[in-house]
Image: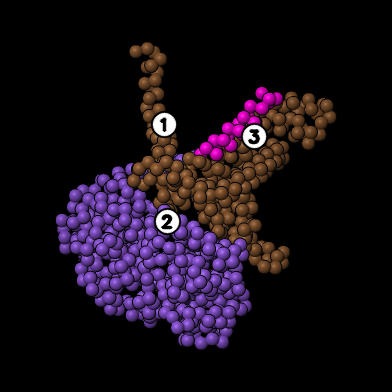
């Protein structure tokens, strides 16, 4: 037995575990998607059934809205927070810890709390706005189809911007002081430092973080499911929730698998093009 | 990615299989919901005293996620011996060959409310023993009736009277009648489908071949239901309210009437003892009968139960008239159990009067999706996205393709 193959024996247990936990479910989902509940091969029937459903395209557009809206504000707010927390001011470490709180709170707790805060009748948000006369009538934040998605996106942004902030802050702290000093000698002001030093330097971090946010966004169920369950009338139904519904509420595992396969393909495409366009872009500061 | 969802299910299955596989022969593992735990332990102790060879192992369940949990364990091949499930779930288990028939277990068939037995009968066989039955009724605030100049002892009976009373009660920041438009789908099915039934309609035909939800009787009833919201008689928050939210609003005296089961009475009394509670039948169209969905719980024995013989014996013990009357949270499925003093409370009279009008919810393998399609239609009406006829036409399209599958 050669030395090389001995090495493979050592990693075999880990590979078996990985195969069981990742490869098997993926392969089995693929199998489920082309069979019926009695395991007979049915070709693309499950795919056709799922695609025919009126909810599917709606869920797809809602997903793009949800992921896109969340990421833009998560990255903007997170980066701004990081730049702020990178300045020196009294009480900075306290503010840094406080800024992390939303990220530390479990999603389900945050979602349930926000559901109550935004409740039309009992919610503190409507109370705070009606009491001083800002609005006449309570607003149905979660029941109006124009406000419900923005509200959910705002909650998601609140939940995850601290993560962006922490990552970007770490990136900012690794920037050598000499760069700033050189810029100041050249007469650069704060905004020019941000634009020409900070942002280019943390670009790799931003690329990686945004990719993570895309994946998490495409995957997220908790916040929407806990607050609206995809309603009212599918206004906030995103594809992951649709899959969950088909599988665990309607007990149609095969159709759920078919939708999962399609969603997986779309997600892979998005991630692929993202990496191609951004991660390997020329002129990267490395 | 989402592909892992399915694998999570299988992990859960194998873990349940491990836990269920650890019991000995002669043990009966009983899954019972948490609200009846004390009484369950009491009855189990009694049974074990009389049958020292059998050990009852109680595993307490909670209502949240219970349908998924039961389905998982039934499909795992290593299920407990006795499970309590809602009547409506039984049909699906029977069709998928996950439970065993219990015709030989049922005693005193004639003593059971027929609708309850119908509910859990499929293909000529009985697949569960119903022990608890209930329907919704309308709970109302007698004080609000008086303040609005209405007679609390003469609650409205017909739809027209009901709308009139509800409109009169909508005053001083209060809402006359709260409907549901949010939460889990079942909330709105239980509260709106009876109106369709009363009016002579249904969501699907009896033979489960045709969608009927866009027929005039059904559309009229859906319009009747959603109009409470459109005409601002039901709270602004209706689209996010389920049964529990409505109860909170009633306790806060923001709402004067709402549909609820008798289990709401205790929490209203506890949280706002000032309210003088009345219970009325659900109002019906002039010259027609009221209706309600019969709800409640049954015992099933899974196909993969380790000790079906002991399980059946234990179920027979639990369903002796006296034990059934003791164990149920609401009403018992046996007529003779109903004679127990605990069911004589005057406030329960309104609920008792509803029982004869209770009907099983329709059953179909795609019923959950069918109700979801209907519920989306109801929400679309309330959102102002679609008119009732249009919304129900769309729902009927979706439902028909689910029936044709």
Q: Is residue B311 left or right of residue B36?
A: left
**Which chain, by letter, is brown?**
A
Chain B's colour is: purple
- Is residue B112 visible in the rendered structure shown here? yes
The picture places residue B137, in percent across and down from the top left corner, at 43, 75
What is the magenta range? A264-286
The local crowd at label 1, few if under 14, some if 14 to 19, many if 20 or more residues have their Cα within 10 Å, is few
For residue A30, above or below residue A146: above
As measured in the structure, the alpha-carbon distance from the residue carrying label 2 to the one carrying label 3 is 50 Å
Q: Residue A18 shows which numbered tag?
A: 1
The reply to whether label 1 and label 3 mark residues of one chain is: yes
Q: Which residue is mark 2?
A: B404
Q: Which residue is mark 3?
A: A206
Q: Chain of mark 1?
A: A
The local crowd at label 2, few if under 14, some if 14 to 19, many if 20 or more residues have their Cα within 10 Å, is few
Q: Chain of mark 3?
A: A
Q: Quick one: quadrant of the C terminus of chain A? A: top right
Tell me the mark number nearer the camera, choosing from 2 and 1.
Answer: 2
């Amino acid at each position: 037995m050669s030395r090389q193959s001995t090495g493979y024996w050592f990693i075999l247990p880990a590979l078996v575990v990985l195969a069981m936990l990742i490869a098997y479910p993926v392969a089995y989902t693929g199998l489920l998607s082309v069979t019926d509940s009695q395991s007979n091969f049915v070709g693309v029937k499950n795919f056709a059934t799922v695609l025919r459903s009126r909810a599917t395209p709606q869920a797809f557009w809602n997903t793009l809205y949800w992921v896109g809206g969340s990421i833009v504000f998560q990255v903007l707010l997170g980066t701004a927070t990081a730049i702020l927390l990178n300045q020196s001011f009294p009480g900075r470490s306290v503010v840094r810890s406080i800024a992390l709180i939303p990220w530390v709170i479990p999603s389900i707790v945050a979602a349930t709390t926000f559901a109550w805060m935004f409740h039309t009748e009992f919610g503190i948000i409507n109370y705070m706005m009606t009491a001083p006369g800002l609005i006449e009538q309570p607003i149905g934040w979660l029941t109006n189809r124009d406000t419900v998605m923005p509200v959910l996106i705002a909650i998601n942004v609140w939940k995850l911007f601290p993560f962006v902030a922490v990552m970007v802050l770490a990136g900012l702290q690794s920037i050598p002081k000499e760069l700033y000093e050189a810029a100041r000698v050249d007469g650069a002001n704060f905004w020019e430092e941000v634009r020409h030093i900070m942002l280019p330097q943390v670009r790799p971090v931003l690329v990686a973080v945004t990719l993570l946010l895309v994946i998490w966004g495409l995957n997220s169920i908790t916040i929407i499911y806990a607050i609206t369950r995809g309603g009212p009338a599918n206004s906030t139904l995103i594809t992951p929730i649709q899959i969950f519904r088909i599988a665990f509420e309607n007990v149609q595992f095969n159709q759920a698998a078919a939708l999962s396969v399609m969603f997986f393909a779309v997600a892979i495409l998005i991630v692929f093009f993202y990496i191609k366009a951004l991660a390997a872009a020329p002129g990267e500061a490395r | 990615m989402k592909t892992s969802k399915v694998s999570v299910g299988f992990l859960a299955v194998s873990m349940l299989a491990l836990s269920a596989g650890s019991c000995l022969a002669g043990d009966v593992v009983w899954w019972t919901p948490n609200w009846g735990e004390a009484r369950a332990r009491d009855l189990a102790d009694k049974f074990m005293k009389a049958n020292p060879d059998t050990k009852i192992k109680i595993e307490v369940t909670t209502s949240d996620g219970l349908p998924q949990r039961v389905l998982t364990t039934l499909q795992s091949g290593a299920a407990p011996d006795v499970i309590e499930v809602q009547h409506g779930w039984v049909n699906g288990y029977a069709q998928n060959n996950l439970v065993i028939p219990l015709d030989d277990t049922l005693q005193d068939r004639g003593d059971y409310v027929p609708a309850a037995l119908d509910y859990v009968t499929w293909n000529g066989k009985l697949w569960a023993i119903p022990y608890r039955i209930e329907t919704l009724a309308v709970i109302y605030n007698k004080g609000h009736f008086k303040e609005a100049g209405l007679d609390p002892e003469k609650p409205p009976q017909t739809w027209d009277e009901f709308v009139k009373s509800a409109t009169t009660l909508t005053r001083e920041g209060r809402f006359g009648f709260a409907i549901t438009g949010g939460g889990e789908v079942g909330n709105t099915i239980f509260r709106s489908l009876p109106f369709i039934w009363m009016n002579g309609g249904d969501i699907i035909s009896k033979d489960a071949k045709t969608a009927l939800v866009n027929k005039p009787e059904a559309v009229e009833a859906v319009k009747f239901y959603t109009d409470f919201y459109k005409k601002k008689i039901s709270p602004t928050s209706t689209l996010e309210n389920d049964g529990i939210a409505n109860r909170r609003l009633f306790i806060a005296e923001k709402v004067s009437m709402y549909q609820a089961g008798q289990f709401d009475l205790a929490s209203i009394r506890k949280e706002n003892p000032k309210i003088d509670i009345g219970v009325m039948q659900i109002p019906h169209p002039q010259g027609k009968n009221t209706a309600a969905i019969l709800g409640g719980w049954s015992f099933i024995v899974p196909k993969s139960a380790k000790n079906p013989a002991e399980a059946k014996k234990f179920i027979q013990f639990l369903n002796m008239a006296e034990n059934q009357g003791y164990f149920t949270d609401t009403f018992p499925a046996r007529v003779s159990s109903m004679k127990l003093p605990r069911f004589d409370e005057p406030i329960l009279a309104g609920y008792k009067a509803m029982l004869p009008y209770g009907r099983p919810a329709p059953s179909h393998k795609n019923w959950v999706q069918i109700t979801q399609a209907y519920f989306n239609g109801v929400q679309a009406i309330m959102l102002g996205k679609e008119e009732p006829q249009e919304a129900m036409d769309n729902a009927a399209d979706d439902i028909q393709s689910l029936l044709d599958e």
